[in-house]
Amino acid sequence: MAQRRTPFGDRARYWFDSTLAHGAAALVGWMALLSLAVVVPASAVMVWTDPDAPPSLAERLAEVWRLTGETLRLGGATGTPLRAMMSVLLALVTLLYVSTLVGLITTALTERITSLRRGRSTVLEQGHAVVLGWSEQVFTVVSELVAANVNQRGAAVVVLADRDKTVMEESLGTKVGSFGGTRLICRSGPTTDPAVLPLTSPATAGVVLVLPPDEPHADAEVVKTLLALRAALAGAEPRPPVVAAVRDDRYRLAACLAAGPDGVVLESDTVTARLIVQAARRPGISLVHQELLDFAGDEFYLISEPALTGRPFGEVLLSYSTTSVVGLMRGGTPLLNPPPTTPVAPDDLLVVITGDDDTARLDDCAESVEKAAMASRPPTPAPAERILLLGWNRRAPLVVDQLHRRARPGSAVDVVAEPGEATIREISEAEADSGNGENGRNGGNGLSLALHHGDITRPETLRRLDVHSYDSVIVLGRDPAPGQPPDDPDNRTLVTLLLLRQLEEATGRELPVVTELIDDRNRALAPIGPGADVIISGKLIGLLMSQISQNRHLAAVFEELFSAEGAGVRLRPATDYLLPGSTTSFATVVAAARRRGECAIGYRGHADASTRPHYGVRINPPKRERRRWTAEDEVVVIGTD
């Protein structure tokens, strides 16, 4: 069989490619030939078309040489061959020097720009906020810090994580949006390396926040980061306050020791479980928590008011028209909702909810109280509750424990989860705790706990349950399996919510569902009704960390506020305080709550319960504001069960 002849063009291209493979010398040679192939003919055309061109061929060739030399910067000397060659040599030396100098400058600038883009330069700031670590919480934390700095000039937030600086800036810019007057500075590097932490200038920072990463061993990473921070701050006085979060309470002591005496360490799983249970017991409470924790509206402050020294706490409740007083800070210990007869001591700070630290102005509102509108009936006793818990994860035992702590007599919890040794063991342990009262902690109320095996993402599993017979349904996501590639942790939760929504549409009855989501972006995808309770653990912890970063003394306030025992945020029927249909001021509500030993801080209007963005929740309304109160309205108070 005859061999097919290779086309000339392919052979020429192959030969050309082969010569380029010899390196830079071949490339320079080809560039020189290409340049001469263009410049020499063009110079000849210019000479031969010039009316003033010399008549002889030798002179014209010399002129072509001169034009070629000027174009290529090779020198244009004419004369003997030696003179022309020396001219070319000098031009080549000059070209080599200039090109080398340009190359060195370009390389240095490129390296410097690359270094800056990698985030390896030291930050020179004062009083800035340092955020160490990267997780879904970082977007909430940065966003809230930006909101807190809206009235400050020259504020800065520095984020250090083991990620590309450009990627971090783009992600934060996309999710946070405008930074206003706050400068965002990102630096790249491991947060557990004491040699890298000085890039953020932690010694001159106003606060340092340590976020738990989205990895299985996140708590150990937080402890290691705190130890690295302590090493980086060795010898620095004063040290900035540190706010950190861990998931497992087993790591909290180690994290507290590493953070130092001025550090604050939160347990994210415990706080999340508490808020889930509170939302299950009183739908809508998660909206109140959101309003209290973000910087978009009114939030907690500690203020000093010498003019109120010696006054009983009950009178202080009506001493401000646009500020809600909820307690006292005495010697670093919060006294939320103390007895109305408690006098204000000279060194006490008032724990208030107000728009800003300078909006709390004395304005007695006692004359706005209308006693005729107050309800005189006793509060409605809380009945036994039946709760359906769909799914099981590492926070589920904490949820059961919180349900057990304040369970009413005759209450029951039914758990539906896939069979598994770990799940069965944990539920058995939780059932044993609920049965024996856990060292008498719950008075032996005997909370009933039952396990049902089933896949909550299958319709037949939910159809077998009489879901409408439960007072509340809690949907928990599943933890990622060890050794398996991570997927969206909310996938199964969204599927379960779709099935529950189908049951709602089939029966025409609304289910009181409390949903735990991990990713805030999935909130818009969740098939739930407007104003439904959605607990996004990372976002809530981010909000708490941001609040505490502005005043670390608020950590003790939030600890009591969200605890199972003690004074906390409650939603009560408005009929416990006011006569249905009455039109009166919010000061009347405050006075009526004072009768019951509670601090009223807001309300949720039933008419707006499905209207964005607040879904009827109003925190710290003006006490002289008058409205018509219906039997479906609810009052937000600080009190005990």
Image (cartoon, rainbow, N blue to C red):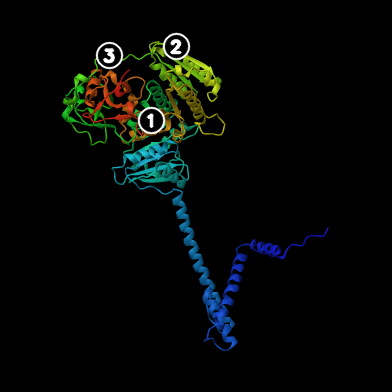
Q: Position of residue 99 (x, y in %)?
A: 51, 66
**Residue shown at 62% from the left, 62% from the top:** 23
Q: Earlier in the sequence, mark 3 or mark 1?
A: 1
Amino acid on which the number 1 mark rests in the picture: Val
Give the labeled residue for mark 3.
Answer: 378
Determine if residue 68 is in view: yes
Label 2 CA crowd tier, 10 Å (few <14, some 14–19, many 20+):
some
As helix, strand or loop, the secondary structure at mark 2 comes to: helix
Q: Earlier in the sequence, mark 1 or mark 2?
A: 1
- Choose between 553 and 403: the one closer to the eye: 403
Determine if residue 230 is in view: no
Q: Which mark is residue 201?
A: none
As helix, strand or loop, the secondary structure at mark 1 comes to: strand
Q: Position of residue 478 (x, y in %)?
A: 51, 27
Label 1 CA crowd tier, 10 Å (few <14, some 14–19, many 20+):
many
Evaluate if marks 3 and 1 touch, with contact meaning CB atoms under 8 Å apart. no
Give the labeled residue for mark 1.
Answer: 265
Label 3 CA crowd tier, 10 Å (few <14, some 14–19, many 20+):
few
**Residue shown at 53% from the left, 73% from the top:** 72
> In which quadrant of the rendered image does the C terminus lie?
top left
Amino acid on which the number 3 mark rests in the picture: Pro
Of labels 3 and 1, the one closer to you: 3
Give the labeled residue for mark 2.
Answer: 435
Q: Position of residue 219 (x, y in %)?
A: 45, 31
**Quarter residue 168 falls in:** top left
**Residue shown at 41% from the left, 20% from the top:** 402
Of labels 1 and 2, the one closer to you: 2
- Choose between 440 and 468: the one closer to the eye: 468
Q: CA distance from mark 2 to mark 3?
A: 31 Å
Amino acid on which the number 2 mark rests in the picture: Gly
